[in-house]
Image (tube, grey):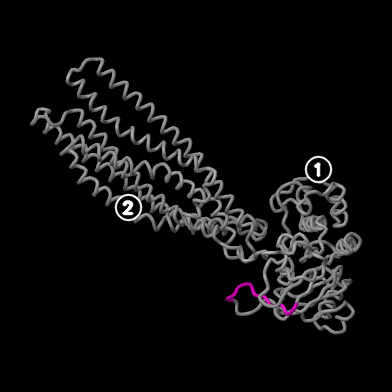
Amino acid sequence: MIKTLVKCIREFKLPTILTLLFIIGEVFIEVLIPFYTADLVNDIKAGAPMAEVVRLGLILVVMAIVSLSFGGGAGFMGAKASAGFARNVRRDVFARIQRFSFENIDKFSTASLVTRLTTDISSVQMAFMMTIRAAVRAPLMFVFSIVMAWRMGGTLAMTFVIVIPVLLAGLLLIARKAMPAFRAVFHKYDRLNESIEENVRGMRVVKGFARESYEKQKFGAASGNIAKDFTYAERVVALNSPLMTLCMNFNMVFILWVGAKTIITNRAATIDVGQISAMLTYGMQILMSLMMISMIYVMMTMSWEAMKRITEVLNEEPTLHSPAEPVTEVADGSVDFENVSFKYAQTAHNDSLSGVDLHIKSGMTVGILGGTGSGKTTLVQLIPRLYDVSGGCVKVGGRDVRDYDIEALREAVSMVLQKNLLFSGTIRDNLRWGNENATDEEIAEACRLAQADDFIRSFPEGYDTYIEQGGTNVSGGQKQRLCIARALLKKPKILILDDSTSAVDTRTDAAIRAGFKAYIPETTKIIIAQRVASVQDADLILVMDGGRIAAQGTHEQLLRTSPIYREVYEQQTNGGDSDE
């Protein structure tokens, strides 16, 4: 895990190393300052000449300035290194997610991935900062201060034999008590983000059913669980302060009492006021170092869980790979399913598709009908290799889809999904997702064919109208037509519409299909629909049922041979189309 994350330091190795060197220099000087301060106090007490006092004073001033410079340099370089490290981790995690197949994404929830990209990486950034600064500074200060205290204080240093074990044991006990709560928080953040995401995406449904109070209660419960864990953990960690104060006061009383008694008894022969002053400073440094070490332990344990979660994403191998010598050119839009079976998980008992044999010639228009859960969407997702088949093979352009470079295959296949998605930005920006080099004329032509040009021009800013995140400021039918125009701009060899005209009326639907024939006659068009009217002019119509192709043929053939198709057709014809 550490090895994986260390790779993300990359170009920030120099700032990281400089931070460590600056910290070492700062600590070294800080432990020397009490030593020279003790000499200065003793010289003043002994009535040393002013020149000697000034000399020692200047030495202390220079040391303080150098220590301050080292500390400032460490802070600057540490901030640069940690921020750069976090940027690289964030980039690497995001890049890895972009390579994930749908199967990989199904493994991690969307809310969990968002938490890992935000909260977890912020926690790891803080841990990295503490590692290169506090985690180096505290142990060095602890060791150097003990050596100097023993050298200067003699028997006075015995106080640390009592104080250090007590403080160390107490800090470790506190940290162990707090850790389970801190670990639990990360998983609860996932649930909190999931609640937020679900609520924001489904805001119209929430308001439509007047369920705001329920959603507030649900969010409050998730937020309350996090607050409860943090409150418990912070209460336990807060015990650090009184424990630290107890040890500091004991240390101070012991040094002053034993030191004063020794000075009076030996008349400053073995120890003087300067040494007592230095011992108090070293005692403070030692105890503060231990306090810092305990906080590092708490922070690192908290961050450990975040590191594991980030590393899980970085080490997750995409389940779909391009072959060693991939085919980079798709010959045509022909599609063949040869005895295809598929299930979403290896542990699933039933196949989502089974025994599918299908042959589509390039340029054909194919309609797919079927009830909910019949396998329509699953079938078309295998064409651009969003999933791999469990058995059999899918061929595009006469080649197994697993022979293609994945990006090249998907460049040749354009999908308008069941859940249409527009990104925040202008209409023009969204359309250029289909072809980033499309001219304004090409964009306008694609929109006319998708029956979108008229409503776009009705907006005050036309094609420069800003689309809110998720396309919330356009209607469902407008969103569908924009997504179809975006797909047309790609000029694919295969165009798949997954129930993508359900929100438009039948007249507009017919106009869109007519546009397909004129604009992309050589493109294979696969249309999933709920209305028979949307597919009855297709060259081939598939009727899906229970993950199988129950029937296939033209409209007239299916009316004669398929009871399912005939029943759907009669219901829609006799009952009238609700969109008319």
| Outermost top residue | 50
Query: Image quadrant of residue 465?
Result: top right
Query: Where is residue 247 drawn, in percent x and y?
Result: 24, 43
Q: Amino acid at mark 1?
A: Glu
For residue 346, side relative to residue 509 (left or right): left
Against 203, is 528 above or below? below
1 vs 2, front mark: 2
Residue drawn at (85%, 75%), measured in percent from left and top? 540
Query: Which quadrant of the figure has residue 71?
Result: top left
Q: Does the image show residue 558?
A: yes
Q: Left or right? Give the position of 81 relative to 243.
A: right
Q: Position of residue 507 (x, y in %)?
A: 88, 63
Question: Crowding near pointer 2: few (<14 within 10 Å), some, many (20+)?
Answer: many
Residue 497, position as x, y percentages in the image: 79, 65
**Pick the front one: 280 or 392:** 392
Placement of the C terminus among the 4 image quadrants? bottom right
Residue bounds of the magenta highlight: 338-347
**Residue 311 in magenta?**
no
Camera-side residue: 500 or 260? Answer: 260
Residue bearing mark 2: 174
Name the residue located 49 percent from the left edge and 40 percent from the top edge.
14
Q: Which residue is label 1 attached to?
A: 461
Q: Is residue 217 visible?
A: no
Above or below — where is 250 with respect to 303? above
Residue 345 magenta-highlighted: yes
